[in-house]
Image (cartoon, grey):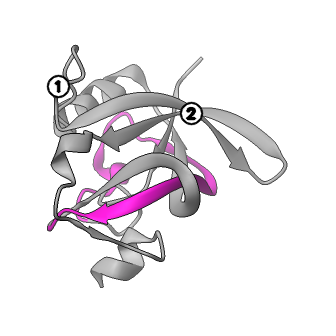
Amino acid sequence: MMPHVFVYGTLRRHGRNDIARYRPAPVFVGKARIAGTLYDLGAYPGVVLGGAGWVKGEIYRIEPEVEAALDQLEEVADDDSGEYIKRHVRVALGAQWIDCLVYEIHPTRIAGCRVIDAGDWIAHAV
């Protein structure tokens, strides 16, 4: 079964790194949100999972080749020392739950970064 990914930043539709540019083409599943806090890191955001806030994003079904490319883009390291840490999270999509990959920012990267209160990178970046 192909994995799903929840994207919340530049990989969203119309974002600078729109996930639609990857091949094989990701399949849009739906708009969703996750519990977390979104941080402005300058050219892109990072999410810290959990808490009372919500982060808006999109779910895509992806092929393993796309997952590998996203791991590289997000600088994921096997020992979790990279810029992002790949997590497995259950994401609500309407009445159903979908297991998704989510790239969480490494906690050492958010010092001094501003919180995006609305939890929506695309609206914030306009």
Q: Residue at x 18, y 39 (%)?
A: 73
Number of numbered discs: 2
Relative to 102, 124 lies left or right: left
Residue 23 numbered tag: none
Residue 89 numbered tag: 2
Relative to 83, 13 lies left or right: right
Q: How far apart in space, not on screen, are marks 1 and 2 (Cα)?
A: 19 Å
Q: Nearer the viewer, residue 113 or 92?
A: 113
Q: In the rendering, at what x and y percent does residue 109 appear?
A: 17, 48
Residue underneath mark 1: 81
Q: Residue at x 41, y 41 (%)?
A: 25
Q: Inspect the image, locate mark 1, and give the three-letter code of the amino acid beneath it.
A: Ser
Instruction: Examine the image and state in which quarter residue 103 appears.
Output: top left
The magenta span reads 16-42
Q: Residue at x 55, y 47 (%)?
A: 59
Q: Nearer the viewer, residue 38 or 97?
A: 38
Does the stretch in magenta take in 24? yes
